[in-house]
Amino acid sequence: MGSGKTTVGRLLAARTGAVFVDLDARVERMFGQTVAELFAKGEDTFRACEHAAFTALLAEPSFAARDVVVATGGGLVLDLRHRDAMATCGRIVWLAVDVPTLVARLQSVATGRPLLAGASLGDRVATLAGDREAAYRDRALAIDAAAAPELVVDRVLAALGGGP
């Protein structure tokens, strides 16, 4: 959350001619509810919907036949099955951002983010980042994303050798 997955993903796809897929938007279309509405039914409900959307995307015949940039929710990589699937069909890029930068980016939208409810924003972001870091590091290429989106895209392309 707040790392720039959607913004950077769209820019990366545009620059490389790849198709862009926002997994959260796909979840909302498939289940006819917003991410917040699904989370209101419990995180397990949202994760099941997210899993179904991700699995359906990978099963599409055209998925493997084209270059695709997928912006996933930050929690998708917590499931080893998802990390395995992502590693099988492409490269996993972790847009790494320090907690103070994430907090600054999320300040104005925190009330609309179910996972940020409860404790102070800084504490919640630090907890989520800490809980997820090992999964992100497992198979992902870490890119410093605490910069302007265009610069982050440059960094991603350089790290990937020029393309998705």
Image (cartoon, grey):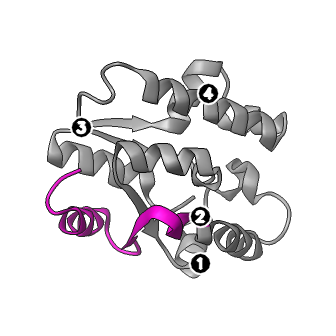
Q: Residues within 10 Å of mark 4 (few under 14, many from 20)?
A: some
Q: Amino acid at mark 1?
A: Val
Kindly identify which numbered label has been placed on residue 67.
Answer: 3
Q: Earlier in the sequence, mark 1 or mark 3?
A: 3
Q: Amino acid at mark 3?
A: Asp
In this picture, residue 79 sits left or right of residue 155: right
Secondary element under disc 2, as helix, strand or loop, is helix
Quadrant hosting residue 99: bottom right
Q: Please report the residue visible at 24 percent of the width from the left and 68 percent of the height from the top.
A: 159
Q: Which residues are magenta?
A: 135-164
Q: Earlier in the sequence, mark 2 or mark 4?
A: 4
Could you tell me which quadrant the N terminus lies in? bottom right
**Looking at this view, is 7 or 157 the one in front?**
157
Query: Which residue is under mark 1?
Result: 99
Q: Disc 2 or disc 1, which is closer to the eye? A: 2
Query: Which residue is under mark 4?
Result: 52
Secondary element under disc 1, as helix, strand or loop, is helix
Quadrant hosting residue 20: top left
Query: Which residue is under mark 2?
Result: 135
Q: Earlier in the sequence, mark 3 or mark 4?
A: 4
Query: What distance separates the C-alpha of mark 2 from that of mark 1?
Result: 17 Å
Q: Position of residue 125 (x, y in %)?
A: 68, 70
Q: Position of residue 106 (x, y in %)?
A: 59, 63
Q: Earlier in the sequence, mark 2 or mark 1?
A: 1
